[in-house]
Amino acid sequence: MKEYLSIRNKTGSISLQLQKKFLYVLFLLVLFSSFVIVLSLSVGSSLISPLEVIKYLFGYGSGEHDFTLYTLRMPRVFLGFLVGAALGVSGLILQGIIRNPLASPDIIGITGGASVGAIIFMIYFMGTFSLNWLPLAAITGAAIVSIFIYALSWKKGVTPIRLVLIGIGVAAAMNAIVTIMIVISETAVTTKAYLWLTGSLYGGNWEDVILMLPWMIMFIPLTLLFSRAVNANELGDEMATGLGVRVQWTRLSLLLISVALAGSAVAFAGGIGFVGLIAPHIARMMAGRMFGGLVFISALIGGSMVVLADVVARTAFLPLDIPAGVFTSGIGAPFFIYLLYRNRHNIR
Amino acid sequence: MLRKTILAMFIALLAGFMLTACGTGEESNQENNDTNENTKADAGSGDDNSSKSADSSESEVRVIQHAMGETEVTGTPKRIVTLYQGATDAAIAMGVTPVGIVESWVEKPVYKYLRDDLDGVPIVGLETQPNLEEIAKLNPDLIIASKLRHEEIYDKLEQIAPTVTHETVYEFKETVELMGEAMNMEEKADEVLAAWDNRVADFKAKVQEKLGDKWPLNVALLNFRADHARIYFTSFAGIVLNDLGFERPENQQEDVWGIKLTSKESIPEMNADIFYIFMSDDEAVHQTYEEWTNHPLWKNLDAVQNDQVYLVDEVAWNMGGGILAANLMLDDIYDRLGLEK
């Protein structure tokens, strides 16, 4: 009996190796995610029965829930899932290329850069320009800062440790800029800025979902192309080079993918933290270390985490609607600790 | 490993169900409140109907120009939701009880000065993130919002009910005007504003008489925070003080919200003839206040030397942001300057 399942094309340019166990886990997670989505669509200020929600999703719903489901809850839930999935995959990629379990989109300047971009927009352009441009400002900030970090880390190639150290330094500098910006801004803008930094799915639109979707459709399959390279990379730069991986090229490409994914997530939902760090860990504990499969698992876990956090944020303190970012760690951390506890014999 | 995974899933599912259960619990409470509300509202609308038949202008469509464009409002709206503090305040000033309001910043959930008038009015969430589902459930026929806070949800609010917005949250007179127009109560709005203008004129006459050439006084509006102090220039209170004829010291005339002072060396920047100080009731804030006011530089300030330093209520002076709060502020100023109202 084979423990691994291989998917590859003739030239071997695409090659995914999946553990059998992965399929079970994937199946369960798909079920779980669907459950989370239906749950989050049915709860809120008024309860809509899950059956009704499922009927609605398949197009047999009655018009009475159009506003609540179609206009309010669905875009918010789907946006949350996409944001979480993007953060999960982004974190997975970073932990893979940096070979450090503490890597997350925050440390390579994505969140910091996006925050600076968003806050500059809020202070200087809000009122003149429509708020619809805020995501663009955020993602531009993320891209500029990430390129900056990569350039600073370059010394005949980029080593993971340089990338991490410079990333942390630049992230600290970005935080300083954010603090200065908040200090000089007026109270109303400060309120908005804090809300953004916490991360919230409040006011999610279908337009946001539609703008976010292409990033996912483009970059998640692209990630899979690198699955073999990442697996080899885990063995160290020399070993990976020996196995025929173009280490620097792979690293740059994956970094760009990671920036694109996390940047788009942060652009639409603000600084939702913790998901990029935790989702890949949970994924690895459930499904082993083969990168190809982990991409899907991390996406599903990240998505479910954010959606669950938002459900709590929307309903726990009714009628108050609280930013989801407050709860992402609240949902992720206990589950993470539980998994660590269950697996304590397997983890050194 | 698989067993562990399943177990983990199971626990997560369980957590999910518990969440739903909690949600349902809240839900039924919520619904009870709502039914009460509805019966009240129904009773109210019964009266409205009788007045409706008497008034033929009820179905007239009016186009309101506001910060986010134009909105059509039909007749005289009866179920109004106010999404910022100043609008809630203005509604009460015009004798209208909103059917939904947002939570207050301090003295939660409703400012003490409005509590009697807003007894039993449901809260629809935070001013920064009002709960859209709650608003929709109230079935309003007019929503008063602020572009500053609610720009991103404006199209959703529009789908619930006609929504008019003000650019900011603290221009209390403009809020009254906008709401008068939107609620088809322009006369009432004019009346409220005229009463304010009369009070302002009365104050100016009395203060001039009492202080002679010392008037107009230079005023500084100070605020202490946990880790810094602020001088407010064009805030809500700034507008009121400006209306009343107070002047700002030369270094505080810039047309911005104000400045933050992070070092006690900046204390001389505060200098003015009279200080009004507001701050939150918080240990760390009181600590800052003590530290700053015990600093040697503080003792040199004109207001301190003339004994013209007043600690004022932050709700009336800053957080309220409406015409009633402005009137409370004015009462306060009369009292402290020893003037007859």
Image (tube, rainbow, N blue to C red):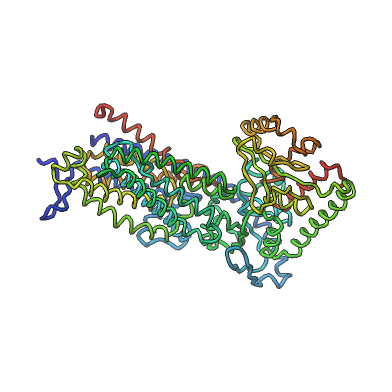
* Residue B275 image offset from top left, x and y in percent: 75, 41
* Residue A307 image offset from top left, x and y in percent: 40, 47
For the residue pair B263 and B139, the one nearer the viewer reads as: B263
* Residue A152 image offset from top left, x and y in percent: 34, 44
Q: Is residue B133 visible?
A: no
Name the residue at the front extreme: A156
Identity of the residue drawn at 38% across and 62% down? A60
Identity of the residue drawn at 74% across and 50% down? B326
- In this rendering, the answer to whether A49 lies above or below A96 is below
Identity of the residue drawn at 66% across and 32% down? B286
For the residue pair B13 and B144, the one nearer the viewer reads as: B144
Dividing the picture into quarters, in which one does residue B6 lie? top left
For the residue pair A325 and B337, the one nearer the viewer reads as: B337
Quick one: quadrant of the N terminus of chain B?
A: top left
Exactly how many numbered labels are in the figure?
A: 0
For the residue pair B294 and B53, the one nearer the viewer reads as: B294
Q: Is residue A295 visible?
A: yes
Judge left or right: residue B96 versus residue B244: left
* Residue A223 image offset from top left, x and y in percent: 25, 51
Judge left or right: residue A172 versus residue B142: left
